[in-house]
Image (cartoon, grey):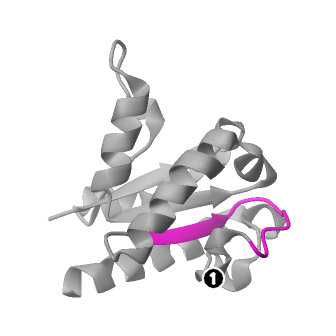
Amino acid sequence: MSIEVFFSYSHKDETLRDKLANHLKLLERQGVISAWYDRDITAGTEWEGQIDEHLESAKVILLLISADFLASNYCYDIELKRAMKRHELGEARVIPIILRDVDWKGATFGKLQALPKNAQPITSWDNEDEAFANVARGIRKAVDQLKKK
């Protein structure tokens, strides 16, 4: 059974989100995860209700961290707060993914182990594919741990 993964991100980071989704596609094809983000909302449905529903059902919540994410009232005040609440209750695993360099120390998710390794922002790697592959391996490992529970 696949584990639902929710992407919380700023639309200004959509290109990076798309690259991450491509790196996670093998996990989807293998039935390990099912990825969901707001671009999956179909026309005529209430977007806020869809986001809330998936934010509540996901077992893994990815926070795609950048200055734009931290500046977004919706990402920070709605999605991040709910994600951290579910994490603290043991209902979901929250994984911060540092997309672009930003001062995130002291943020509520700052106590969580971030990806990629050493929380080095993806855009600062010499090879972005290496960074995304590192993130994908980290997510695979986290999902494997969740499945064993």
Query: In the rendered view of the protein, which quadrant contains the C terminus?
Result: bottom left
Name the one closer to the observer, 22 or 74.
74
Residue 35 seen in the current view:
no
Image coordinates for residue 28, horizontal then vertical, percent: 31, 57
Residue 46 on the magenta segment: no
Name the one closer to the observer, 54 or 129.
54
In this picture, which residue range is highlighted in magenta?
Answer: 93-106
Q: Quadrant of residue 60?
A: bottom left
The residue drawn where x is 71% and y is 42% is: 72
Compared with 122, 89 (above or below) is below
Name the one closer to the observer, 96 or 118.
96
Looking at the image, residue 74 sits to the left or right of residue 101; the answer is left
Query: In the rendered view of the protein, which quadrant contains the N terminus?
Result: bottom left
The residue drawn where x is 32% and y is 57% is: 58
Q: Amino acid at mark 1?
A: Lys
Name the one closer to the observer, 118 or 76.
76
Q: Quadrant of residue 34?
A: bottom left
Image coordinates for residue 147, horizontal then vertical, percent: 22, 80
Looking at the image, residue 46 sits to the left or right of residue 15; the answer is left
Residue 104 on the magenta segment: yes
Q: Give the residue furthest to the top.
A: 44
According to the image, label 1 marks what residue?
Answer: 111
